[in-house]
Amino acid sequence: MAGRIGRVLLLSGGTACAALFVQALFVQSRAETPEAGAKVTQVTGLSGVKSKTKGHLVVNGGNLNFTHEQLKVDVPVNSVEDVVTGNDSQRAVGGTLGTLSMLAPYGGGRFLSLFRTKLDTLTIKYRDTDGGLHGAIFTMPAGKADLLKKDLLAAGAHTSVPSEAAAAPTAKEQKQ
């Protein structure tokens, strides 16, 4: 069907319509392919990275890569001793506007703080090349932390909290 539409557009509208059609197909195909890793906020912990830095976190080969503009930090996955995920929430109205809203009369600002957005947290504990113990905390959109944890565990990281799928007994184990 897409071929027929493309031919009709080429015949009727010329190159401008064809360009729009090709662009629409490209956007659709990019939306269908999942992006590896996640857009995260590094709350604290990575060496050389300021607190609350936004970036991209991905498990690539044997490393956990955090990138922000030209800054790139690699943590070897085999040095990760613990990976923990969690669910949290944050104020929907934050920053200066959220702070100023607290001054609203009759508790209006407190009412605004009731509106929350859900997010996931990923906490890692790792050792550097000298054996020093470090930890890093990341926040990301809901549903992304478990995927990153699975990638880390598959690449060789360790965890003190097993994933829910591995911890749940199978039907065969429940019958016994």
Image: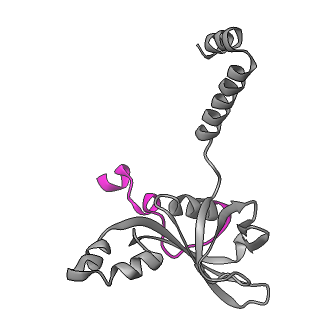
Q: Residue at horizontal 39%, vertical 68%?
A: 92
* Residue 30: percent from left, percent from top: 64, 39
| Total numbered badges shown on the rendered structure | 0
Which picture quadrant has residue 89?
A: bottom left
Q: Quadrant of the N terminus?
A: top right
Colour logic: one colour
In the rendered structure, does residue 51 fall within the stretch colored magenta? no
Depth check, front residue: 137 or 61: 137
Depth check, front residue: 73 or 5: 5
Which picture quadrant has residue 10?
A: top right
In the rendered structure, does residue 162 fall within the stretch colored magenta? yes
Can residue 176 be seen? Answer: no
Which picture quadrant has residue 21?
A: top right
Residues drawn in magenta: 154-175
* Residue 95: percent from left, percent from top: 47, 77
Q: Is residue 18 above or below residue 136?
A: above
Q: Residue at horizontal 43%, vertical 62%?
A: 164
Among all residues in the image, which is located at the extreme left?
Answer: 106
Q: Is residue 26 above or below residue 53?
A: above
Q: Quadrant of the C terminus?
A: bottom left
Depth check, front residue: 34 or 100: 100
Q: Residue at horizontal 70%, vertical 77%?
A: 79
In-image side of 110 versus 55 (left or right):
left
In-image side of 156 versus 120 (left or right):
right
Among all residues in the image, which is located at the extreme front?
Answer: 105
* Residue 169: percent from left, percent from top: 38, 58
In-image side of 71 versus 82 (left or right):
right
* Residue 107: percent from left, percent from top: 23, 81
Depth check, front residue: 17 or 68: 17
Can residue 162 be seen? Answer: yes
